[in-house]
Amino acid sequence: MRKTKLGALLLAAILIVGCLTLVGCGNSPQSGKQPVDPSKTSTPAVADKGDSLTVYSGAGLRVAMDEIGQAFEQKYGVKVNYNYAGCAQLLSQMELSKQGDVFVGGSLNDMEIATQKGFTSKYYEVVYHIPAIGVPKGNPAQITCLADMAKPGVKLVLGDEQSNAIGKKGAKIFAKNGLQEGVNKNVVARDATVNEIVTHLAMKQGDAGLIWEDNGFGAKDIEVVSIPPEQNVIDKVPVCVLSFSGKTELAQKFADYVISPEGKALFVKHGFKPIE
């Protein structure tokens, strides 16, 4: 009988130790490192890589903006899709679509309109936009100054005063110098973009036109006649993030790049003068 009680006590002790051992192997904080669920871990991704931006830009800025877009893509892995046109046309497109991320205007007036329409709340000035007289290579009509553009018989190709920055700017310049009447008599074409003016002059379809100084930079088929500062109405190229952009941070990164020393250097490469 004594042996039976002793055996029972021994069996009970073994069972108790076994249970304690099992508890010790459970998922308690004291059990050491826990398995990691891969679905709950995050690894830093390359910010913005593979993303894209839609940028509205005045057509006359195309050469510089193309290179800026390529440089931005190489640096950040972000594709820049441009929409080039006369700024009045771009503003109309924005008003209808309420889409896009950044606007680069040909003049401060374009940005003032964008601000009034609520497309942006702030903008940044990048480089000076300087009007100049463009003439075909060799300057066959011997145009040397603004007054020459008002002489009888001179064929002028100008920008549309309603659709592009250089057209609006030209109207102010001719009014400032009292040349509206003579100039208006000499106009043979009004183009929607400054690039079209340059093309017509290169093809010798006009004796002179008003363009931006940078449009003649490195050009083979046209020449540029500078306008004295006191007769000129110099403008600035502005950039802004659009209020309806769905990629505000990325759009701001592009705007910051445009106004950075690196971005301005690319403008300078194409004949612009930076705003310090």
Image (spheres, helix red, strand yellow):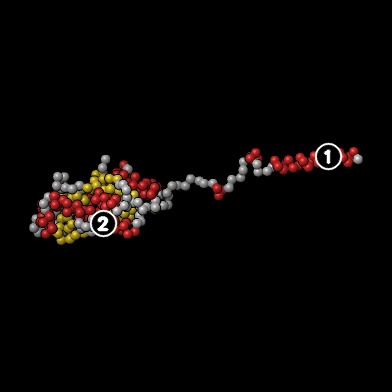
Label of residue 9 in the image? 1
In front here: 248 or 118?
118
Residue plotted at (17% across, 51% down): 172
Residue plotted at (55% across, 48% down): 40
Q: Quadrant of residue 201?
A: bottom left
Task: Kindly state the secondary structure of the residue where label 2 is placed.
Answer: helix
Mark 1 burial class by Cα count in 10 Å: few <14, some 14-19, many 20+: few
Image position of 171 (left or right of 111): left
Residue plotted at (41% across, 52% down): 51
Residue 173 x/y as whole percent: 16, 51
Residue 28 x/y as whole percent: 65, 41
For the C terminus, the quadrant is top left
Task: Kindly state the secondary structure of the residue where label 1 is placed.
Answer: helix
Label of residue 244 in the image? none
Residue 214 x/y as whole percent: 23, 49
Decide: is 234 above or below 87.
above
Q: Earlier in the sequence, mark 1 or mark 2?
A: 1
Q: In the rendered image, is residue 28 in sight?
A: yes
Q: In the rendered image, is residue 62 in sight?
A: no
Image position of 46 (left or right of 190): right
Image position of 84 (left or right of 230): right
**Residue located beneath label 2 in the image:** 88
For the N terminus, the quadrant is top right
Residue 263 x/y as whole percent: 31, 45
Q: Quadrant of residue 157?
A: bottom left
Q: Which residue is farthest left? A: 152
* Distance Cα–Cα, label 1 vs label 2: 98 Å
Tell which tag, 1 or 2, sits nearer the viewer: 1
Residue plotted at (20% across, 57% down): 161
In front here: 36 or 155?
36
Q: Amino acid at mark 2?
A: Ala
Q: Amino acid at mark 1?
A: Leu
